[in-house]
């Protein structure tokens, strides 16, 4: 049940909704026997799936850009495209960064980054972040 909770928390954390899978993961490590590999797999899978939801939302949102109520102007969308082109698809390696990472995955969908490339970059990014969280939590567990 704890692994399912971690999966769902990691999934929500990757969407534009607020959540913190890192806190849950650290708590799980410091409070009991858990398999670190499975913890990493579950958190990474949930977080990547959440980013894939963002990507899909990005592919759908542009359908509405001609509507009056659409919250982003054409100029802002053009500027975002220029910035994304300037920094390239490798900016998706920052998908792990709080605040900017989740919108970046939506932008990846808006600008139709090839899904295989998106998936590889985001999986690497998110997986590396959870390795860092695990390393921190294991170190913290040894201190406590």
Image (cartoon, helix red, strand yellow):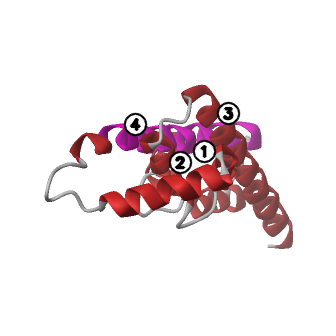
Chain part drawn in magenta: 36-60
* Residue drawn at (25%, 62%) of the image: 71
Confirm whether the magenta stretch covers residue 133. Answer: no
Q: CA distance from mark 1 to mark 4?
A: 20 Å
Q: What x and y, as percent, mark residue 109?
A: 45, 40
Q: Residue furthest bottom?
A: 144
| Residue underneath mark 1 | 43
| Residue underneath mark 2 | 6
Magenta span: helix, strand or loop, mainly?
Answer: helix
Image vertical order of residue 139 relative to residue 29, above or below:
below
Viewer-closest of 121 and 31: 121
Reading the chain from its start, which is encountered first: label 2 or label 4? Answer: 2
| Residue underneath mark 4 | 56
Kindly check if marks 3 and 1 are in contact, taking CB atoms under 8 A apart as contact: no
Asked whether residue 17 appears in the rendered view, the answer is no
Q: CA distance from mark 3 to mark 1?
A: 16 Å
Reading the chain from its start, which is encountered first: label 1 or label 4? Answer: 1
* Residue drawn at (85%, 72%) of the image: 143
């Amino acid at each position: 049940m704890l692994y399912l909770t971690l999966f769902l928390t990691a999934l929500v954390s990757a969407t534009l909704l607020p959540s913190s899978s890192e806190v849950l993961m650290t708590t799980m490590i410091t409070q009991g026997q858990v398999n670190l590999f499975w913890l990493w797999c579950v958190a990474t899978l949930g977080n990547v799936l959440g980013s894939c939801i963002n990507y899909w939302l990005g592919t759908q949102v542009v359908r509405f850009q001609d509507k009056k109520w659409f919250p982003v102007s054409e100029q802002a969308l053009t500027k975002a495209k220029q910035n994304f082109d300037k920094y390239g698809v490798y900016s998706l390696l920052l998908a792990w960064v709080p605040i900017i990472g989740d919108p970046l995955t939506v932008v990846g969908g808006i600008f139709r980054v090839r899904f295989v490339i998106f998936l590889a970059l985001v999986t690497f990014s998110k997986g590396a972040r959870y390795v860092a969280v695990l390393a921190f939590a294991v170190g913290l567990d040894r201190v406590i």
